[in-house]
């Protein structure tokens, strides 16, 4: 099998990494992904793309062990894979956790990006190959800045995670200007899916809806219900990442739907989609409050529409329905296993 291009993805086992890998493989790329060594399997989201390493055919997906804390390993992977495009999606991506592990978060999110850029700078200098680089920036960087937020809005980060993402963003801008590297910063607003990690609020809610509906859970504990987010579908957002790297010139783009809803509105819609009244099940637990909150994110993605021709296909109601249906199905399977005598996995929600 021959491939049209080669891509390297950090964070391939995460929500976005899995959708992006599918998109690139479908477009004829060979995709190399960096995975962390873990004591249990962490490749569940990309199992559909897996092919036997012993097969004689060239494989569309090849995995390499690595970590953003290990610059030497990143260099070796770059040199051996010689990618045309690099997507840096790896991160300790949980905002609340970043208050508990700020140093680790900064090491992976800020310094990890720098390590990868340094490896890429040397690779470009020795091979002459101008590799295209996508940096996964976040609307969290806007933090306390009033909506709607666009590329020209001020960064005012409100968590160690967001501060580290601002550093990653500016490393990208600086390396683009200093070394003529092709680097695009995506500033993506919240994007969700049935593959979303279960400790982010949308998935925590839709998982609970499924489990409550099937009698596996009685209530759901949440923190701040008033914050507003601009929630889109991850499958739409990885297309914007790819589009950024197909342009003639590197640039930075906000990616968002333009519509914002509160956490409470998401919960109302999700419970209603399963025929349940949210007020009967939701309780507040202050442990989920953050030391400093981001109250209102609503993106202005007009530049992405104009330059990339990108627009979201899934709206808020479509997203809620997609996630609820998937988690109703998951809970149904869970309930069936329990009835058959198997014990459910032990989960703790952040
Ligand atoms: P995610 O599901 O949490 O995935 C994070 C990925 O990073 C996982 O593959 C994880 O590996 C990997 N990772 C974590 N620490 C690492 C390390 N030290 N070295 C190498 N890999 C490491 O995140 P996501 O939602 O897909 O988001 C992708 C990127 O976009 C992240 O950088 C995130 O901060 C950013 N972002 C996300 C959103 C959003 O709404 N989803 C919005 C804006 C920006 P394991 O599977 O082994 O844990
Ligand atoms: O779902 P969240 O944890 O997402 P958050 O903090 O907006 O961050 C996500 O989106 C960012 C893009 O803006 C990404 F960069 C980042 O990596 C991540 O993917 O929380 C959303 C809102 C917050 O205001 C939080 O306080 O929900 C509120 N919330 C209320 N109860 C809760 C809970 N959040 C979580 N995780 N768990 C709760 O029980």
Image (cartoon, grey):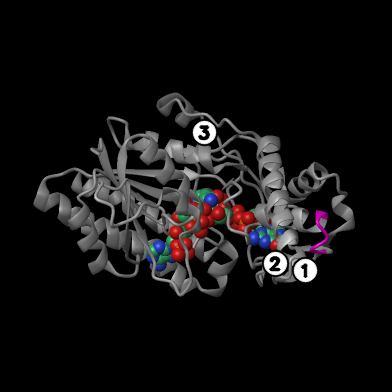
1 vs 231, left or right, is left
Q: Residue at x 50, y 58 (%)?
A: 44
Which-is-in-front pick, marks 2 and 3?
2
Determine which of the numbered discs, if any, sits on residue 51 in the image.
Answer: none
User: Which residue is at the front of the view, 334 or 264?
Assistant: 334
Q: Is residue 216 magenta?
A: yes
Mark 2 beta carbon near ligand 2 (under 8 Å): yes
The C terminus lies in which quarter of the figure? Answer: bottom right
> What stretch of residues is rendered in magenta?
213-217
The residue where tag 1 is placed is 285
User: Which structural element holds mark 2?
Assistant: helix
Measured Cα–Cα span from mark 1 to mark 2: 6 Å
Q: What crowding class fits label 3: few (fewer than 14 Cα within 10 Å), some (14-19), or many (20 or more)?
A: many
The residue where tag 2 is placed is 288
Q: Is residue 33 above or below residue 185?
A: below
Q: Residue at x 53, y 68 (%)?
A: 98
x and y percentages locating residue 132 in the rendered image: 27, 43
User: Which structural element holds mark 3?
Assistant: loop
């Amino acid at each position: 099998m021959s491939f049209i291009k080669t891509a390297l993805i950090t964070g391939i086992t995460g929500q976005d990494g899995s959708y992006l890998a599918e998109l690139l493989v479908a477009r004829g790329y060979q995709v190399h992904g960096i995975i962390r060594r873990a004591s249990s399997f962490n490749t569940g989201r990309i199992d559909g793309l897996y092919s036997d390493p012993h097969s004689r055919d060239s494989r569309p997906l090849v995995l390499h062990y690595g970590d953003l804390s290990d610059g030497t390993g990143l260099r070796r992977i770059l040199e051996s894979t010689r990618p045309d495009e690099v997507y840096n999606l790896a991160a300790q991506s949980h905002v609340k956790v970043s208050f508990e592990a700020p140093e680790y978060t900064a090491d992976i999110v800020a310094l990890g990006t720098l390590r990868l850029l340094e490896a890429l700078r040397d690779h470009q200098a020795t091979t002459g190959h101008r590799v295209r680089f996508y940096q996964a920036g976040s609307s969290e960087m806007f933090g306390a800045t009033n909506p709607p937020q666009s590329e020209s809005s001020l960064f005012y980060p409100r968590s160690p995670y967001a501060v580290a993402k601002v550093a990653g963003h500016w490393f990208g801008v600086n390396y683009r200007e200093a070394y003529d590297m092709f680097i695009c910063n995506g500033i993506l607003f919240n994007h969700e899916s049935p593959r979303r990690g279960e400790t982010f609020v949308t998935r925590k809610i839709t998982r609970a809806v499924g489990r409550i509906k099937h009698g596996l859970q009685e209530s759901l504990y949440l923190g701040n219900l008033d914050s507003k987010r601009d929630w889109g579908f991850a499958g739409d957002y990885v297309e914007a990442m790819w589009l950024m790297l197909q342009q003639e010139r590197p640039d930075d783009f906000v990616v968002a739907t333009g519509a914002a809803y509160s956490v409470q509105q998401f919960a109302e819609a999700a419970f209603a989609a399963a025929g349940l009244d949210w007020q009967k099940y939701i309780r507040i637990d202050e442990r989920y409050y953050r030391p400093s909150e981001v109250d209102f994110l609503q993106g202005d993605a007009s530049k992405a529409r104009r330059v990339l021709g990108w627009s979201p296909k899934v709206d808020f109601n479509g997203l809620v329905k997609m996630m609820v249906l998937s988690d109703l199905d998951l809970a149904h399977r869970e309930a069936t296993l329990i009835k058959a005598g198997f014990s459910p996995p032990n989960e703790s929600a952040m």
